[in-house]
Image (cartoon, grey):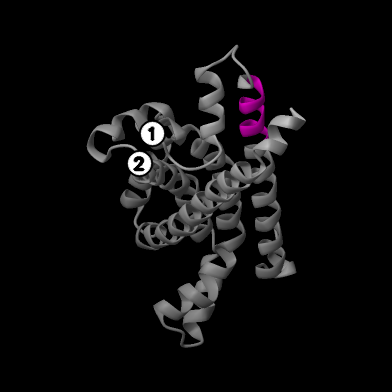
């Protein structure tokens, strides 16, 4: 195992960076889209119910099957991997964003209106900061989930550590096959831990102590 890692260290580092970069960028885009969608739906019961249903149904779709379906229209490579990772990243964040925004006390919003604050200012100065701990919790859940899904996306020749896993599985029993799988799995776990620590640090920097959950 040591020889395998030492001989392929540069490839492992490069694949790790690709993996982490894809997940991180998808999380950022998914977070922005989820907050925008939540802002449009959380005050409309019918829309909020539809968004919750989409989130619930979307999470039941097997990621491996979705990747396979996307190969036909999108081909192999980065694009289907990004689409799949972004899709699954969006769902938990959207649900938490709706819950967080809907959970802001009405009395707080009314007090802000009484002070002469407009709708947009209330959202960015009152509602979004109060909902941010719940949204960030959704981002953490999403990050852990899509870190593994990004590995599965290597089935469509997507970037990242999944290539080591599928390469090892395709020649299981052959030379270095087990080492290849273990390297990919351990690498994904370590990246997931690093990402979660970064998000915890973000929470400590961005959430006032009085509203931390």
Between 88 and 58, the one nearer to me in the picture:
88
Separation of marks 1 and 2 at Cα, in angstroms: 7 Å
Q: Is residue 182 magenta?
A: yes
Q: Position of residue 119 (x, y in %)?
A: 40, 77
Quadrant location of the N terminus in the rendered image: top right
Q: Secondary structure at mark 2?
A: helix
Between 188 and 113, the one nearer to me in the picture:
188
Residue 120: numbered disc: none
Q: Earlier in the sequence, mark 1 or mark 2?
A: 2
Do callouts 1 and 2 mark residues in contact (Cβ within 8 Å)? yes
Quadrant location of the C terminus in the rendered image: bottom right
Q: Is residue 82 magenta?
A: no
Residue found at the far top of this picture: 173
According to the picture, the residue beneath numbered tag 1 turns out to be 156
According to the picture, the residue beneath numbered tag 2 turns out to be 80
Q: Which image quadrant for residue 211?
A: bottom right
> Which residue is depicted at the point 36% across and 41% down?
77
User: Relative to 95, does residue 71 appear above or below in the rendering?
Assistant: above
């Amino acid at each position: 195992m040591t020889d395998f890692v030492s001989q392929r260290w540069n490839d492992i580092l490069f694949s790790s960076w690709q993996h982490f970069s894809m997940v991180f960028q998808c999380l950022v885009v998914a977070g922005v889209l989820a907050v925008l969608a939540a802002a449009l739906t959380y005050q409309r019961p019918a829309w909020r119910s539809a968004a919750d249903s989409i989130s619930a149904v979307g999470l039941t779709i097997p990621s491996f099957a979705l990747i396979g379906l996307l190969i036909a229209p999108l081909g192999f490579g980065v694009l289907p991997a990004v689409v799949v990772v972004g899709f699954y990243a969006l769902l938990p964040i959207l649900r938490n964003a709706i819950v967080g925004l809907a959970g802001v006390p009405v009395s707080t919003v009314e007090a802000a209106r009484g002070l002469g604050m407009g709708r947009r200012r209330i959202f960015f100065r009152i509602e979004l900061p109060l909902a941010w701990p719940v949204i960030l919790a959704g981002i953490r859940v999403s990050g852990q989930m899509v870190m593994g899904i990004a590995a599965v996306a290597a089935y469509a020749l997507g970037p990242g550590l999944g290539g080591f896993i599928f390469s090892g599985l395709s020649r299981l029993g052959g030379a270095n096959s087990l080492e290849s799988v273990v390297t990919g799995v351990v690498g994904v776990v370590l990246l997931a831990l690093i990402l979660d620590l970064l998000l915890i640090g973000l929470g400590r920097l961005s959430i006032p102590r009085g509203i931390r959950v």
